[in-house]
Image (cartoon, helix red, strand yellow):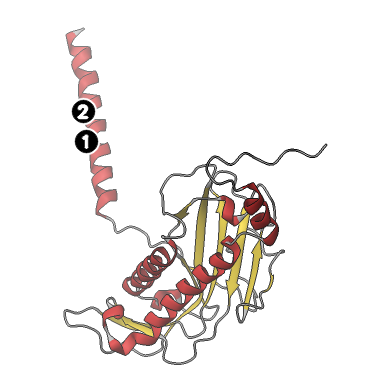
Amino acid sequence: MLRKRTGIQSLVLECSILLLAATLAGCSRKPEPAAVKKLAPGAEFAGFLSNYSNLKPNPAFENTRTYVKQDDAKNVHKYFAVIIDPVEVYLSSNADPAKMPDRGRKAVVAYFQHAITRAISDAFPVVEEPGPLVLRLRTALIGVDVSGATATGGQAGGDALERAIDIGKVGVEMEMIDSVTGEQIAAAVDRQNLGAGAVVGSENFSRDEKFAAAKEAFDGWAQRLRDFLDTEHELSKEDAERADAGYRPYGEPPPAKKK
């Protein structure tokens, strides 16, 4: 009996060693890079939004299509907070994903995320947990390209990118969905053509005057998002009239109901 138990223990020990060796080998491998999303050739939209069918040109914003749910129970100004999802990136259809500098992509995403948060946080407090009166903001940069030339300039310390990131033809797709149901409450597709010169060539591009056009583009998109939300967050004329009719100074009784 004792000899049998020792054999079982030895087998368990051997299996444990093999499992540990396999685990360590797996940990030593470099993680596979995340798949890079690309804009399909000739596509009008990236496929990022949950629904495009209700988008219509917005006369208040050039080259922009928008949608806002018109519903007394569910519309933008019924919500009081927002979750801001990480910004996603879609490369242009002719871009080579292998040439996209990962450091640059992360820098672009981080800056735009910060710009969005800064632009809307005083209108919608930013929270992390979903709830019945909480929106989820989803945003994507569409058509990011990689410059054919090696990036030059940038701050000292080796933060210059291997290749510059071109955002001259980039657009933005965004939507606000109900954080509980996933229902689309508002959406916008912004297609501003920035032209030549809007490039990112270093990780700390926001501190480098050479890349001021890119920084201004991200700030501008964030501000347009805020302007769009402001126009839709205002009470409609009917809602405002109902609010005024329902307002009562302290101590003033409500009007008598008509018979």
Tell me if residue 134 comes above or below residue 30 in the rendering.
above
Tell me the quadrant of the picture where the N terminus can be found.
top left
Residue type beneath disc 2:
Leu
Q: Nearer the viewer, residue 44 or 178?
A: 178
Q: Which percent across, then down, holds residue 192?
A: 55, 82
The answer to whether residue 248 is visible is yes
Quadrant assignment, res 149: bottom left
Q: Which percent across, then down, holds residue 258?
A: 80, 40
Q: Residue at x 27, y 84 (%)?
A: 208
Q: Nearer the viewer, residue 92 or 208?
A: 208
74 lies left or right of 168:
right
**SS of the residue under disc 1:** helix
Q: Which residue is mark 1?
A: 17
Q: Which mark identifies residue 94?
A: none
Q: Which residue is mark 2?
A: 13
Tell me if residue 200 comes above or below residue 33 in the rendering.
below
The answer to whether the residues at label 2 and label 1 have Cβ atoms under 8 Å apart is yes
